[in-house]
Amino acid sequence: MPLIVFEGPRMEPEAKRELVRAFSEAAGRITGIRREAFTTVIHENGAENIGVGGELLADMLSRRSEGGD
């Protein structure tokens, strides 16, 4: 069973449905494996759980929204 793993931001349920559908369709088309065989796992990561350049993404985004960057 092929596995697709997506690491990304928190999403609404409809966006997740569309993402899973699109990944499965594209992977099936490209590999020749039937779409129904693919399993997709979505790992949602909040900005408070991501570090970029030694700093939390949440802090970077907060400064940007305040006009600091």
Image (tube, helix red, strand yellow):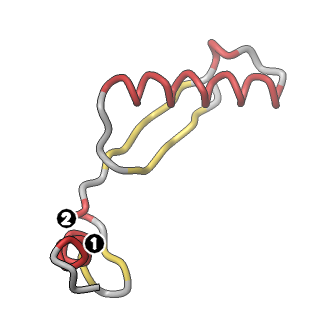
Instruction: List x then y, in percent, for residue 20.
Output: 51, 26
In this picture, is 57 found above or below 16? below
State the SS at label 1.
helix
Identity of the residue drawn at 82% across and 30% down: 30
Quarter of image, res 64: bottom left
Question: Which label was assigned to residue 57?
Answer: 1
Viewer-nearest residue: 29 or 62: 62
Q: CA distance from mark 1 to mark 2?
A: 6 Å
Determine whether, in the image, residue 52 is placed left or right of residue 31. left
Indicate the position of residue 8 as horizontal and vertical percent values: 40, 50
What is the number of the mark on residue 26? none
Horizontal relation, residue 15 to residue 3: left or right: left
At a point 31% along the width and 75% down the height, the residue shown is 51
Quarter of the figure with the C terminus: bottom left
Can you identify the residue that label 2 sits on? 48
Picture residue at 37% right of the left edge, 86% below the top: 53
Relative image position of residue 57 (x, y in whole percent): 27, 72
Total tally of numbered discs in the picture: 2
Few, some or many residues within 10 Å of mark 1 (<14, 14–19, 20+) = some
Is the residue marked by circle 2 packed among few (<14), some (14-19), or many (20+) residues within 10 Å?
few
Identify the mark nearer the N-term, 1 or 2.
2
**For this rendering, which residue is in front, 47 or 43?**
47
Q: Which amino acid lies under the numbered mark 1 shown in the image of this protein? A: Leu
Which residue lies at the image location 21% right of the left edge and 80% below the top edge? 67
Q: Viewed as shown, does residue 52 lie left or right of 61?
A: right
11 over 24 or under it: above or below: below
Which amino acid, by three-letter code, is at mark 2? Answer: Glu
Q: Are marks 1 and 2 in contact (CB under 8 Å)?
A: yes
